[in-house]
Amino acid sequence: MSNMKNMQNQLDEQQRQDAVYEAAMASVRRSQRAREAGGYAVMSAAMGYGESAMGKGWFSKINHAAKLFCIAAAFIIPNALIVYLVF
């Protein structure tokens, strides 16, 4: 009789371990799915930005002005720094 109780304890422990393992694996799958969804969101945003920046709307004009501002800043700021330090 003692052997049967021992076997029942082992079966209960195995079921508990199986449940814990399944819960852990489900958590890993959820984490992987969330990471994959984040990647899709980033690519969707980048593609949406690229399409809207190349169009003819107001966003395209703002994007072009921002590019020109950055180019001008790249030329002016180093020169202004040298003038400030030398003179």
Image (cartoon, rainbow, N blue to C red):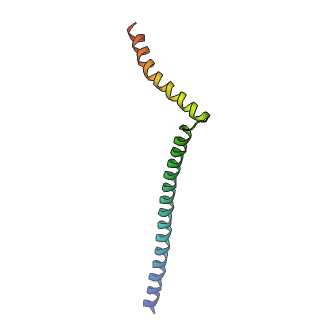
Q: Residue at x 50, y 66 (%)?
A: 26
Q: Nearer the viewer, residue 23 or 83?
A: 83
Compared to residue 58, the image places residue 46 above or below, namely below
Compared to residue 12, the image places residue 75 above or below, namely above
Compared to residue 55, the image places residue 22 above or below, namely below
Residue located farthest toward the top when viewing the structure as drawn: 87
Q: Nearer the viewer, residue 59 or 12?
A: 59
Quadrant of residue 86 in the image?
top left
Q: Residue at x 53, y 30 (%)?
A: 64
Residue 82 position in % (x across, y down): 39, 13
Residue 30 position in % (x across, y down): 51, 61
Q: Is residue 38 left or right of residue 58?
A: left
Quadrant of residue 62 in the image?
top right
Q: Nearer the viewer, residue 63 or 26?
A: 63
- The number of discs equals 0
Q: Nearer the viewer, residue 1 or 77?
A: 77
